[in-house]
Amino acid sequence: MACFMASFLFLLARTLARTPLTFEGLDLKVVDNVEEAEFILVHGTEVLGLSSGSAVPKQLEELEKILEQCALRKIPMVVANPDYVTVEARALRVMPGTLAAKYEQLGGEVKWMGKPGKIIYESAMAMAGVDAPECIAVGDSLHHDIMGANVAGMQSVFITGGIHADELGLHHFGEVAEASKVQELASKCGAYPTYVVPAFSW
């Protein structure tokens, strides 16, 4: 997670290995305390970035305490990766969207940037020089990948063996989900895939 400001920021990243960010050409500066922050930038959930350019590991509970301080000061948040969870070794790991949802519960203002926002898909299509009918989105998140494809008007492939595996009653790689369970979950999430596959392998 990260705290950003128009010219100052306070940041959080996914892991120490993924911490480095570049703000070249931007009038932004990392700060080390909430009092100096003008906004928060969240792109991970495991470390807190420092003005020195280094980062320190933080537990989720520690980050939530920082969010409480930020909410009291009414510091707006920008979440650059709104996924709620991701899969690592068959276990779900909390992602920035979960922190952003927590911040909203605390009364904080959040600017969600990323899937399922339509602008992400439109930008990608513009960069590739294609239109929605020529595209297909692939992902394991109904809330983000598939809903985003729906919003952008493109086809989609839902990978059932990802973050929704437990909800679909799947226990093994490549296991095929029951169509009725997929339909029920899709309706619950309000996101409807064009195609459904259990996994990718190569």
Image (tube, rainbow, N blue to C red):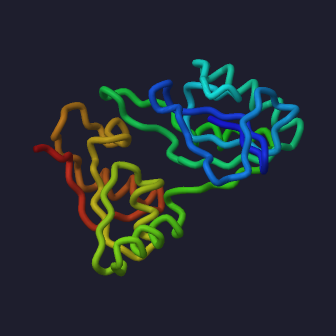
Q: Which residue is at the far left?
A: 202
Residue 129, relative to residue 35: is it above or below? below
Q: Position of residue 102 (x, y in %)?
A: 68, 38
Q: Position of residue 144 (x, y in %)?
A: 46, 55
Q: Position of residue 71 (x, y in %)?
A: 82, 38
Q: Quadrant of the C terminus?
A: top left
36 to the left or right of 174: right
Residue 70, relative to residue 152: is it above or below? above
18 to the left or right of 46: left
Residue 201, relative to residue 26: is it above or below? above
Question: Residue 90 falls in which quadrant of the image?
Answer: top left
| 38, 99: nearer the viewer | 38
Q: Which residue is at the far front?
A: 25
Q: Who's the residue at 50% across and 46% down the image?
A: 83
Q: Who's the residue at 30% across and 26% down the image?
A: 89
137 to the left or right of 69: left
Q: Position of residue 195 (x, y in %)?
A: 24, 63
Question: Residue 1 falls in which quadrant of the image?
Answer: top right
Q: Who's the residue at 89% across and 38% down the image?
A: 73
Q: Who's the residue at 59% across and 56% down the image?
A: 113
